[in-house]
Amino acid sequence: MRRYAYLKEPIKCNNKDFIYKIMLYQCRHGVSLFEYCSPDAVRCSYDCWYPDIESVYDDWNDVIDEQGWIDIGEPLPYQDDAF
């Protein structure tokens, strides 16, 4: 399963970058969370791993915008983070 969401407000992630949208990809090994430093980005700038989907929702549901999570199709091979 893959889902993405835009953030209510960009979140600063280091000295120069802000996260504008995120995508999760759930597979049998856990959940990858991809972070995008532009609203129009098609490849992620950063990523992290979660053991389960509930942990992703616990960390991110309060900061995503009113559209919520938007389902997206399964990725092509080796392109988990690509839109």
Image: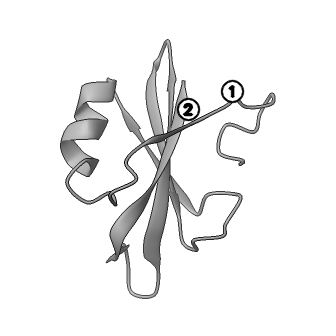
Kind of residue indicated by mark 1? Glu
Left or right of 16, for residue 82? right
Residue at x 19% of width, y 40% of height? 58
Q: Quadrant of residue 2?
A: top right
- Residue 70: percent from left, percent from top: 50, 42
Pick whichever of labels 1 and 2 is earlier in the sequence: 2
For disc 1, the neighbor class at 10 Å (few under 14, some 14 to 19, many from 20) is some
State the separation of the CA atoms marked 1 and 2.
6 Å
Q: Residue at x 25, y 60 (%)?
A: 63
Q: Mark 2: few, some, or many residues within 10 Å (few <14, many ≥20)?
A: many
Q: Measured along the vertical axis of the image, is residue 56 above or below residue 9?
A: above
Mark 1 residue element: loop
Looking at the image, what colour scheme do you see? one colour
Q: Secondary structure at mark 2?
A: strand
Residue 31 lies in what quarter of the image?
top left
Q: Amino acid at mark 2?
A: Arg
Considering only vertical position in the picture, is 49 above or below 13? above
Evaluate if marks 1 and 2 touch, with contact meaning CB atoms under 8 Å apart.
yes
- Name the residue: 69% across, 26% down: 74
Of 36 and 63, nearer the camera is 63
> Which quarter of the image is occupied by the N terminus?
top right
Instruction: Decide: is 12 above or below 16.
Output: above
Left or right, 64 with respect to 80, comes to: left
Q: Which residue is mark 2?
A: 2
Spot occupied by residue 54 in the image (x, y as percentages of width and height): 25, 27
Q: Residue furthest top?
A: 28
- Picture coordinates of residue 35 (x, y %)? 49, 58
Q: Quadrant of residue 71?
A: top right
Residue at the right extreme?
Answer: 77
Residue annotated with mark 1: 74
Residue 49 vertical placement versus 46 (above, below): above
Residue 19 in the image: state x and y as whole percent: 44, 70
